[in-house]
Image: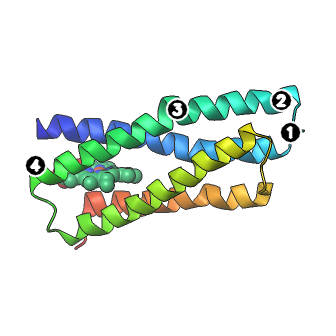
């Protein structure tokens, strides 16, 4: 059972991260589209579907399976897991910000530049590298 839960956890993580890396990239292109244009409306649909159909359910599955693994494996007392949960909380906070920006774009009220979203794009990637090292290497 544990190994199956771990496999499902990694699958959920891949889906979550794929969306977390792709959504800010869509924002970069959306910034260049004139509000009200056909292109801008297409980006709105893509962003909404990506958030609702992939990123949100994948985050919930990652959390539930991760917490289940920590419980069944007795990992809660280990420092690598505590550090990992902290970084996943930061990642979840960025998820919340991305959801807010999807709503802003949907209402043609985006306030951020292309450069801003390019920088934001890097943060989930850096967090993901640290989280995977903590989960696999368990350095402390
Ligand atoms: C707070 C949410 C999370 C919790 C509580 C959690 C907890 C865990 C636990 C307890 C394991 C099993 C470790 C083992 O059996 O060796 C695990 C495996 C793993 N987790 Fe998470 N996790 C969470 C989120 C994430 C995220 C966001 C990522 C990646 C970005 C991630 C990547 C992995 C990977 C790659 C493994 C497989 C490690 C291995 O088999 O060596 N986890 N997680």
Q: Do the residues labelled 2 and 1 touch (CB within 8 Å)?
A: yes
Going from the N terminus, do you reach mark 3 or mark 1 first?
A: 1
Identity of the residue drawn at 26% across and 67% down: 82
Which residue, given by chain and number where applicable, does mark 2 sit on? 39
Residue nearest the observer in this picture, 31 or 133: 31
Quadrant assignment for the N terminus:
top left
Q: What element carries label 4?
A: helix
When asked about the image quadrant of residue 105, the answer is: top right
Identity of the residue drawn at 15% across and 39% down: 3
Going from the N terminus, do you reach mark 2 or mark 1 first?
A: 1
Lateral position of residue 18 relative to residue 9, left or right: right
Q: How is the image coloured?
A: rainbow
Identity of the residue drawn at 80% across and 41% down: 108
Q: Nearer the viewer, mark 2 or mark 3?
A: 3
Q: Is residue 109 above or below residue 56?
A: below
Quadrant assignment for the C terminus:
bottom left
Q: Is residue 6 visible?
A: yes
Mark 2 surroundings: few (<14), some (14-19) or many (≥20) residues within 10 A:
some
Query: Could you give the CA–CA distance between mark 3 and mark 1, rounded to whole angstroms?
Result: 22 Å
The label on residue 33 is 1
Q: Is mark 1 on a helix, strand or loop?
A: loop
Identity of the residue drawn at 36% across and 57% down: 132
Question: Percent from the top left, x then y, of residue 54?
Answer: 49, 32
Which residue, given by chain and number where applicable, does mark 4 sit on? 72
Residue nearest the observer in this picture, 61 or 13: 61
Going from the N terminus, do you reach mark 1 or mark 4 first?
A: 1
Which residue, given by chain and number where applicable, does mark 3 sit on? 52
Going from the N terminus, do you reach mark 2 or mark 4 first?
A: 2
């Amino acid at each position: 059972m544990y190994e199956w839960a771990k496999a499902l956890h990694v699958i959920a993580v891949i889906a979550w991260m794929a969306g977390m890396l792709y959504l800010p990239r869509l924002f970069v292109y959306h910034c260049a589209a004139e509000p009200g244009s056909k292109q801008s409306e297409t980006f709105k649909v893509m962003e909404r579907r990506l958030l609702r159909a992939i990123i949100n359910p994948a985050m919930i599955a990652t959390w539930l399976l991760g917490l289940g693994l920590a419980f069944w494996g007795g990992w809660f007392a280990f420092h690598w897991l505590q550090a990992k949960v902290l970084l996943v909380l930061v990642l979840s906070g960025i998820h919340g910000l991305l959801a807010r920006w999807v709503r802003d774009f949907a209402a043609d009220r985006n306030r951020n530049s292309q450069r801003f979203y390019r920088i934001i794009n890097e943060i989930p990637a850096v967090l993901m590298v640290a989280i995977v090292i903590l989960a696999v290497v368990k350095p402390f």
